[in-house]
Image (tube, grey):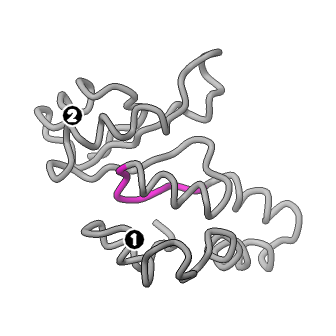
Amino acid sequence: MVLKGILDPEDAREAVRFGADGIVVSNHGGRQLDGVLSSARPLPAIADAVQGDLTILADSGVRSGLDVVRMLALGADGVLLGRPFVYALAAAGEQGVVRVGPDRQRDAGGDDPHRGAGGWGDFAGESGAGGWLRPV
C-alpha cells in the first residue's frame, strides 16, 4: 500500500507504523489547497525520518528532467511524472509520449560529467534509479 499526500515527517512515520510499503510526498499539484507548501520543501526532513523503512516517491510540480534530479537529490527514491505525458499526448499523440522520457533525461543532463556523477545510478545512490524513467 502506498499513501499519497504526505507533507510532514510525523505523517511519514505514521505511514511506517501503519505498515505502508511507500509514500508519495505530494501536494496534489497544489490544486487542492491554496498556499500549500511545495512537495520539495518537506522532502529532506521526510527522507531523514523514514529513509529505508519504506519507498519514498515524489510528486507535484515535476515537469523537467532537472526537477527529477532535484527530487532525487532531496531524498526521493523515485519521482512520478504525469503532466508531461498528458501534454505530450495532447500535442503530438503517441510520438509525443514516446519522446517524453528521452527529452526529460536530456534536459537533466543525461550522463553529463558536470553533475559530478558518472551516471544516474551514481547520482541516486542506493535508490537504484539508474533506469530512472520507466512506466509504473
Q: Could you tell me what secondary structure mostly forms the magenta stretch?
A: loop
Query: Measured from the top left, where is residue 23 in percent x and y?
Result: 32, 43
Q: Name the residue beneath numbered marker 1.
A: 123
Query: Measured from the top left, where is residue 88 in percent x and y?
Result: 79, 64
Residue 106 quadrant: bottom right
Q: Name the residue beneath numbered marker 2.
A: 15
Looking at the rendered structure, the secondary structure element under dot 1 is helix
Say whether residue 85 is left or right of residue 116: right
| Type of the residue with mark 2 | Ala
* In the image, residue 31 above or below residue 102: above
Query: Measured from the top left, where is residue 30 in percent x and y?
Result: 62, 28
Q: Total marks drawn?
A: 2
Q: Write the start and end of the magenta stretch as one range.
A: 75-81
Q: Is residue 89 magenta?
A: no
Looking at the rendered structure, which numbered label has been put on residue 98? Answer: none
Q: Residue furthest top?
A: 34
Looking at the rendered structure, the secondary structure element under dot 2 is helix
- Cα distance between the residues tagged 1 and 2: 27 Å
